[in-house]
């Protein structure tokens, strides 16, 4: 018969026998021992279950949709879910997925962020029709975007092939209309809210300089009160046309609200930007508008701000707006491009 001996330490004991060492645990310690053992087993089971769930979700998404990606709204960077469940950053911006150089005019990621909920759009690409659904996550900084080919859901493929270009043109027109001011025909404020942040980030990353004008018609209330809102609208249209004519195709003229406009110049030096602002101001002041058989002239005050690395849209607009109102204080009909 094997010899056994017991060595005691505190409230626990070790039983030595010929076959090895066996823990002999007092009752309170014994309960804690088994509780800890069960806890560790539960953690392992939960981890295994989460791995199974993650793998299953990836398989389901891959089976249901043609593409599942994560979009960073501010930068337009694109990430994808790999079959192993990892998230990998791609080398292209999200709009380049659709062979576009600039952010989509009907960007579902920006719309989902603004709406704080699911948004949808339809894209026509390479003679196929896709449903694109955006779902905001991480307080709206990122959007889960799923893409589904719905071409086969349309009644006749031959009709689709015939109508694809027509549909794409219509979608582009609808998206364009959403960003156009109905009165003046130039961009509306939505352009600044939804498209300008991405364009500013792209210009920053490419080392391109951006300039912003805030333009306000001086004493516009007097024009409205004297000649009525219909004639006031004609003044707004005339100013908008001068702004549009005074910039390049790569730039943007925006009706910001009321009698206030915004001009965005891309890839321009500070000196040239100020020259453009002065030329626009002079052209508006010389423009004759016939109202009730009378020649009416208006003037504008312009505040200019310049982009710098990392600057936000809000700060850029605030700087231009502050300089605009400094121009008002100095007597109106002038361009202010620096803080005095």
Image: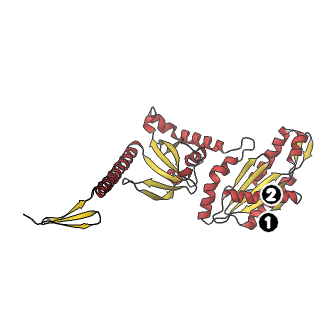
The location of residue 108, given as percent across then percent down, is 55, 46
Image point (50%, 43%), residue name: 132
For label 2, the crowd category at 10 Å Cα-Cα, with few meaning under 14, some 14 to 19 and many 20 or more, is many
* Vertical placement of residue 92 versus 65, above or below: below
Check disc 1 and report its element: helix, strand or loop: loop
Q: Is residue 220 left or right of residue 73?
A: right
Q: Is residue 64 left or right of residue 215?
A: left
Can you say which quadrant of the picture contains the N terminus?
bottom left
The location of residue 249, given as percent across then percent down, is 68, 55
Residue 76: image quadrant is: bottom right
Image point (74%, 62%), residue name: 305
Can you say which quadrant of the picture contains the C terminus?
bottom right
Q: Is residue 115 visible?
A: yes
229 vs 340, nearest the viewer: 340
The location of residue 90, given as percent across then percent down, is 47, 58
Please tell me how many numbered marks the rendered image carries. Answer: 2
- Tell me how far mark 2 sits from mark 1, CA to CA: 11 Å
* Vertical placement of residue 214 versus 111, above or below: below
The location of residue 98, given as percent across then percent down, is 51, 50
Q: Are marks 2 and 1 in contact (CB under 8 Å)?
A: no
283 vs 43, nearest the viewer: 43
For label 1, the crowd category at 10 Å Cα-Cα, with few meaning under 14, some 14 to 19 and many 20 or more, is few
- The residue that disc 2 covers is 324
Give the mark nearer the N terminus: 2 vs 1.
2
Residue 292: image quadrant is: top right
Residue 14: image quadrant is: bottom left
Q: Identify the image's colour scheme: rainbow, by chain, secondary structure or one colour.
A: secondary structure
In the image, which disc is placed on residue 90?
none
Image point (80%, 49%), residue name: 239
- The residue that disc 1 covers is 339
Image point (23%, 62%), residue name: 23
């Amino acid at each position: 018969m094997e010899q056994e001996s017991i060595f005691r330490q505190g409230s626990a004991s070790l039983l030595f026998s010929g076959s090895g060492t066996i823990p002999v645990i007092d009752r309170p310690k014994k309960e804690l021992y088994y509780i800890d053992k069960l806890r560790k087993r539960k953690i392992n089971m939960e981890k295994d279950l989460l791995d199974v769930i993650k793998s299953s979700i990836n398989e389901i998404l891959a089976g249901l949709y043609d593409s599942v990606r994560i979009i960073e709204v501010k930068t337009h960077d694109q990430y994808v879910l790999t079959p192993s469940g990892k998230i990998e950053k791609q080398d292209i911006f999200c709009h380049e997925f659709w062979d576009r150089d600039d952010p989509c005019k009907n960007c579902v990621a920006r719309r989902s962020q603004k709406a704080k909920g699911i948004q949808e759009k339809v894209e026509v690409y390479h003679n196929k029709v896709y449903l694109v659904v955006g779902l905001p996550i991480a307080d709206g900084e990122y959007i889960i975007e799923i893409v589904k080919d719905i071409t086969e859901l349309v009644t006749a493929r031959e009709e689709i092939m015939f109508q694809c270009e027509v549909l794409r043109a219509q979608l582009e027109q609808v998206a364009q209309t959403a960003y156009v001011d109905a009165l003046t025909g130039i961009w509306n404020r939505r352009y600044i809210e939804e498209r300008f942040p991405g364009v500013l980030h792209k210009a920053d990353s490419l080392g391109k300089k951006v300039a912003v004008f805030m333009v306000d018609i001086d004493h516009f209330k007097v024009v409205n009160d004297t000649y009525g809102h219909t004639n006031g609208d004609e003044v707004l249209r005339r100013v908008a046309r001068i702004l549009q004519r005074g910039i390049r195709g790569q730039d943007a003229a925006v009706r910001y609200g009321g009698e206030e406009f915004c001009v965005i110049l891309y890839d321009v030096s500070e000196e040239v930007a100020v020259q453009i602002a002065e030329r626009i101001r002079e052209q508006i002041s010389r423009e004759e508008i016939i109202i009730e058989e009378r020649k009416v002239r208006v003037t504008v005050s312009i505040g200019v701000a310049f982009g710098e690395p990392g600057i936000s849209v809000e700060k850029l607009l605030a700087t231009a707006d502050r300089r605009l109102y400094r121009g008002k204080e100095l007597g109106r009909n002038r361009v202010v491009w620096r803080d005095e």
